[in-house]
Image: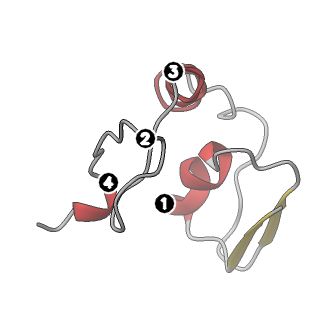
């Protein structure tokens, strides 16, 4: 499966299996705001040679939202 890294495999013990990740209810809100409401859309559009440092990255929603714009590097801290 090409998008296997995007699969959600729930874990009842809070520790996801090796090739998955766990989404908390609050994460859904952040993802909705970032991708559906385009929360970061008007703030910053990286250029191909930009190096982006996402301070306070949390779940990485900002980094994911700008990755299609292909900045040179994205660092999440």
Q: Which mark is residue 53?
A: none
> Height in image: 44 above or below 33?
below
Q: Which of the two labelled residues, at mark 1 and mark 3, occupies the earlier sequence position?
A: 3
Q: For mark 1, what is the residue?
A: 68
Residue 63 place in picture, x, y as percent: 64, 55
What residue do we see at 36% from left, 68% from top? Answer: 18
Q: Which mark is residue 6?
A: 4
Image depth: mark 2 or mark 1 in front: 2
Q: Is residue 70 left or right of residue 74?
A: left
Between the residue at mark 2 and the residue at mark 4, the CA separation in whole angstroms equals 20 Å
Image depth: mark 4 or mark 3 in front: 3
Residue 7 place in picture, x, y as percent: 26, 51
Label 2 Cα neighbours within 10 Å, binned few <14 / some 14-19 / many ≥20: few
Q: For mark 3, what is the residue?
A: 25
Q: Which of the two labelled residues, at mark 3 and mark 2, occupies the earlier sequence position?
A: 2
Q: For mark 2, what is the residue?
A: 13
Between the residue at mark 2 and the residue at mark 1, the CA separation in whole angstroms equals 33 Å
Query: Could you tell me which secondary element the residue under label 2 belongs to?
Result: loop
Between the residue at mark 1 and the residue at mark 4, the CA separation in whole angstroms equals 15 Å
């Amino acid at each position: 499966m090409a998008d296997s890294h995007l699969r959600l495999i729930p874990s009842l013990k809070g520790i996801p299996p090796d090739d998955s990740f766990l989404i908390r209810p609050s994460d859904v809100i952040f993802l909705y705001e970032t991708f559906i409401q385009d929360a970061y859309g008007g703030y910053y559009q990286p250029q191909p040679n930009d190096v982006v440092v996402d301070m306070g990255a949390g779940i990485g929603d900002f980094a994911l939202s700008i990755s299609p714009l292909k900045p040179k590097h994205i660092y999440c801290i």
